[in-house]
């Protein structure tokens, strides 16, 4: 028997099952093939007579107990309050509301469902709940080995009852699993199948929002978010709406909505998630002290919210509290080992001149990406970010082209591909993707920095200056390595020429024509002037345009002057 005891929120590993529950016989047709459009859900079969009688007897006994309790309460003049829900009930309530459960409650729910399905191997809803809980555990703990267990359990649920026979929750679980593995096309397929059959099932819209966002389909993500808000009011809808506003660059709306979600959240895990979102918004707009305060509040509310450890580390880097930042990153990697945290910690070490420690983290990143790949998780994007700046830019381009071919066309992928192309010497092509990332409207200092550097490389100095200024203004400490390079590149560009670029001034007016001689009058008649052609009057030369970085660079190149230290520092 595999009963999972309630564990401390800091614990990351639920116990392994002691034995595998027996497999149910497979249905005549493959239950994993998506049903055809128009398929209808069939309700589960009615309970047997024996089950009905047993439930009736239990109800009678329960009614007697309740009546006796009520009489005692009347005689004593006082009664006990409602029973405090246990961890399993709290986790189920959170899932039913569409909110995150704490790790300790999630652990208890997994143990409870494991015990139940061992003796009820054909209980499709319980198997679906268990499989989805495995997905959430793996996502919250970064233990990718649980994804394979989730897939196996969800397929067992579909073997017990196919999705078109009322087991849509197993399909929703498979969609959540596909999102966690960064297979957004599969997630979209599963989610849209459920939506066609149950358009008012609110539980499918969060997985659809994640899938559409991963595919870069802002229009579909917006529509799904709005539909989710119609079907499921409260904190979950506010959280999704805040993320939508954040992705579109509507900072004030995102902040107001996120604050409302934090104010209305009641459960610890839900509250911590809302506070974490406020911390991320503060960090992105260049307010690291506010970010640290929000991340600290999230950790006080739920010590198992390990993502706030990494958020706190980023904000501490911006405050130049380096020792604390290093400790926070190390704690985050111990409790929530994600490749992107290893990359960030490696870059922090590199910015401090600790190249050996940086290489250790980069090697750790490669190992984590390889392990994730074995579990079916695609971490190509973070690996490509590493290769573009610290490894092989051509390899980064190849990885990201593969992502683009799979229709993973979010702003993050577009920005990474544009930057990798620039680093590989293909700045003109990279410019297209960098612009696409910026055109989504998201206010991301790294995107603006990448676009500005590419434009500077292509000698488009005006837009380059604007985007570099935007990067520094949006978040002055957006990266321990890239933020100083952004300021150096901006300083090297200097101030714009007075009066603006020369080609934007109106052309000089044409020279005024010479006055014609008056005709001679002879006996009352006009005499035409001589038709001999006149030489045109010399026109004044147009003023030469103001000096610009482009002209200065061309003059320096013609003179064979080597680049200065300031110019050399512009290259990222």
Image: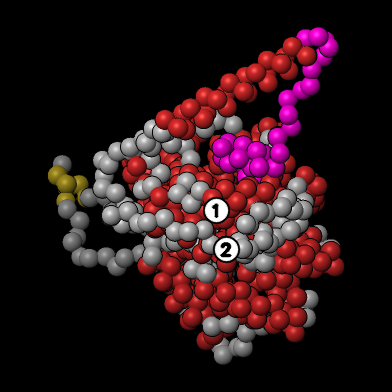
Name the secondary structure under disc 1: helix
Q: Which residues are magenta?
A: 74-103
Secondary-structure class at tag 2:
loop
Quadrant where the image shows the C terminus: bottom right
Query: What number is the disc on residue 19?
Result: 2
> 92 and 212: which one is in front?
92
Mark sitting on residue 118: 1
Rate crowding at label 2 as few (under 14), some (14 to 19) or many (20 or more) other CA atoms within 10 Å.
few
The answer to whether residue 536 is seen in the rendering is yes
Does 548 appear above or below 363?
Answer: above
Q: Position of residue 482 (x, y in %)?
A: 66, 69
Residue, x 52% and y 24% (percent of image)?
Answer: 56
Which residue is found at the position 54% from the left and 50% from the top? 119
Pointers 2 and 1 in contact (C-beta within 8 Å): yes
Q: Vertical placement of 95 versus 306: above or below?
A: above
Q: Is residue 567 visible?
A: no
**Quick check: 33 left or right of 50?**
left
Give the residue displayed 48% in from the left and 40% down from the top: 203
Q: Position of residue 148 (x, y in %)?
A: 51, 64
Q: Magenta segment: does it hold 89?
A: yes
């Amino acid at each position: 028997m595999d009963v999972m005891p309630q564990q401390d929120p800091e614990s990351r590993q639920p116990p392994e099952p002691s034995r595998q529950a027996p497999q149910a016989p497979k249905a005549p047709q493959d239950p994993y093939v998506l049903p055809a459009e128009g398929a209808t859900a069939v309700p589960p079969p009615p309970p047997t007579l024996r089950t009905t009688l047993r439930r009736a007897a239990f109800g009678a006994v329960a009614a007697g107990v309740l009546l006796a309790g009520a009489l005692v309460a009347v005689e004593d003049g006082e009664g006990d309050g409602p029973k405090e829900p246990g961890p399993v009930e709290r986790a189920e309530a959170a899932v039913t509301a569409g909110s995150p459960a704490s790790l300790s409650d999630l652990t208890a729910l997994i143990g409870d469902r494991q015990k139940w399905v061992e003796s009820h191997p054909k209980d499709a809803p319980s198997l679906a709940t268990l499989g989805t809980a495995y997905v959430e555990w793996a996502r919250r703990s970064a233990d990718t080995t649980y994804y394979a267990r989730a897939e196996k359990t969800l397929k067992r649920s579909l073997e017990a009852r196919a999705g078109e026979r009322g087991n849509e929750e197993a399909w929703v679980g498979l969609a959540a699993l596909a999102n966690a593995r960064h297979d957004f096309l599969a997630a979209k397929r599963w989610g849209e199948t459920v939506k066609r059959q149950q358009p008012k099932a609110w539980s499918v819209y969060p997985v659809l929002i994640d899938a559409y966002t991963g595919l870069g389909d802002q229009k579909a993500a917006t529509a799904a978010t709005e539909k989710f808000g119609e079907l499921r009011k409260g904190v979950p809808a506010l959280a999704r709406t805040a993320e939508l506003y954040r992705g579109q660059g509507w900072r004030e709306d995102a902040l107001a909505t996120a604050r409302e979600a934090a104010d209305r959240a009641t459960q610890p895990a839900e509250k911590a998630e809302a506070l974490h979102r406020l911390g991320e918004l503060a960090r992105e707009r260049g307010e690291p002290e506010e970010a640290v305060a929000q991340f600290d509040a999230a950790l006080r509310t739920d010590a198992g919210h390990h993502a706030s450890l990494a958020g706190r580390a980023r904000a501490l880097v911006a405050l130049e509290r380096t020792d604390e930042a290093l400790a926070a990153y190390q704690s985050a990697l111990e409790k929530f080992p994600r490749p992107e945290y290893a990359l960030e910690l490696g870059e922090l070490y590199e910015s401090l001149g600790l190249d050996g420690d940086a290489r250790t983290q980069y090697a750790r990143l490669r190992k984590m990406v390889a392990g994730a790949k074995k579990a079916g998780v695609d971490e190509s994007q973070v690996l490509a970010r590493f290769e573009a700046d610290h490894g092989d830019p051509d390899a980064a381009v190849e990885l990201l082209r593969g992502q683009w071919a799979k229709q993973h066309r979010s702003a993050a992928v577009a920005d990474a591909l544009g930057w990798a192309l620039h680093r590989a010497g293909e700045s003109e092509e990279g410019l297209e993707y960098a612009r696409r990332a910026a055109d989504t409207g998201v206010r991301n200092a790294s995107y603006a920095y990448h676009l500005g550097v590419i434009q500077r490389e292509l000698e488009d100095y005006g837009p380059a200056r604007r985007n570099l200024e935007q990067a520094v203004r949006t978040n002055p400490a957006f990266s321990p390595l890239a933020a100083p390079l952004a300021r150096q590149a901006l300083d090297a560009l200097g101030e714009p020429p007075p009066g603006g670029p020369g080609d934007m001034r109106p052309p000089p007016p044409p020279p005024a024509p010479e006055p014609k001689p008056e005709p001679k009058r002879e006996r009352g008649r006009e005499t035409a002037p001589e038709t001999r052609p006149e030489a045109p009057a010399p026109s004044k030369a147009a003023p030469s345009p103001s000096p610009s970085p482009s002209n200065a660079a061309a003059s320096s190149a013609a003179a064979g002057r080597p680049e200065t230290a300031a110019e050399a520092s512009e290259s990222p």
